[in-house]
Image (spheres, rainbow, N blue to C red):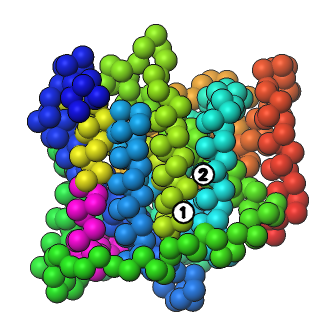
Amino acid sequence: MKKYFQFDELGTNYKRETIAGLTTFLSMAYILFVNPSMLSLSAIPDLPAEMRMDEGAVFVATALAAALGSLLMGILARYPIALAPGMGLNAFFAFTVVLTMGIPWQTALSGVLVSGLIFILLTISGLREKIINSIPAELKFAVGAGIGLFITFIGLQNAGIIVGNDATMIGLGDLTKGDTLLAIFGLVITVILMVRRVTGGIFIGMVLTAIVGMATNLIGVPQAVVGEIPSLAPTFGAAFENFGDVFTIQMLVVILTFLFVDFFDTAGTLVAVANQAGLMKENKLPRAGKALFADSAATVVGSILGTSTTTSYIESSAGVAAGGRTGFASVVTAALFLLALFFSPLLGVVTAAVTAPALIIVGVLMVSTLGKIEWDRFEIAVPAFLTIIAMPLTYSIATGIAIGFIFYPITMLVKGRGKEIHPIMYGLFVIFVLYFIFLVE
């Protein structure tokens, strides 16, 4: 095993890789509780039961998808990169596709499945590089920042810090409410932990917030910590129930969004973590095809199990910082996700007030791409800004992407830079114009 993972060549050992795998797990363990809360729309009151996914089933699907994805990444690609259902994509799934568009969650899972299958085909065919190169870097950065603002907005809303206002549309909520105060406490604690660079700061912040919530009777005390693994039946195979409904223009836009965000989020994470670990060779990523296959295969399996798109996690950089250099670290992380299946009773203490600080902090991390956009070039600034601002204001990641991709060819052509626009961008321009003409009411 040491030879397969190249321990000697990379100057590492079992102890270091195990610690790295544990560090990565703690840094991303929050997804086990945030994802079920997001996909079940638990923070949204008075919804029909059929719009909500079963929290217990999503918890199991999240853990299994993360375990499988991390295991494939560790064994096939041999990278210290862990996977799990992605933040941003789960928000798009729940709040845009299901809540705003009114698409059944079963059909949304079908969309995730199709996007994963397309990703596999793109990986096998080698078209990945062409598509990546067709999208301007500025729009990639804008999409990441926009999703960050969208997630933060959801977190502030779930916390009751931002509420609806008849006069100004939104406004400051009642900060004296118990749940809102608990969320503010969680936010302050999490910020302190993150500033101090405490490993697993987001996860620890959630734990401390839940403990304070139970101590103040704002959250019920769970009957147990360890329990039976919840049934996967409510979500397993649901992606096939409405599979025929994915062949519409509306679902095409949804699938393109799933594909687009996962596509570039994965590529960015792989390059960033591999660079940090010193695994890049001549500015190229060895075994990139295997890494992308692991990512897309996890998305396909995850959708069948019952969760949104599975993707590579930038939190893996915490494990690399702890010394991780090989895929064995990812294997350790995978094992810990499987072990976590027995802690489902803790789902009951993960309320909106507990998850809100995590959403806000993840948003902060995602908007770091703003600094990479050329704001002094107006033809770039306009589509980038509209992409970013439209996501939280329209409550839709897809709409933000559509607006930015429509304005980009316009501003570039007017500037006389039309030759820099890839033909694929013109195709996306047409698709998104048709989207607004025929689908947006």
- Residue 419 can be seen in this image: yes
The residue that disc 2 covers is 116
**Residue at horizontal 73 percent and vertical 49 percent from the top:** 402
Q: Looking at the image, which residue is at 15% across and 29% down?
A: 13
Residue 120 drawn at (x, y percent): 61, 43
Q: Are marks 2 and 1 in contact (CB under 8 Å)?
A: yes
Which residue is the site of mark 1? 303
Quarter in which the C terminus is drawn = bottom right
Element at label 2: helix
Q: Alpha carbon of mark 2 to alpha carbon of mark 1: how far?
A: 9 Å
Residue type, numbered disc 1: Ser
Is-magenta flag for residue 348? yes
Which residue type carries mark 2? Gly
Is 170 located above or below residue 262 in the figure? below
- Percent across and percent down for residue 304 are 54, 65
Tell me the residue at 24%/20% (across/down): 10
The span picked out in magenta is 336-359
Q: Nearer the viewer, residue 395 or 47?
A: 47
Q: Which quarter shows the N terminus?
A: top left
Label 1 crowd bin: few (<14), some (14–19), many (20+), radius 10 Å: many
Let me know if residue 187 appears in the view.
no
User: 251 and 379: which one is in front?
Assistant: 251
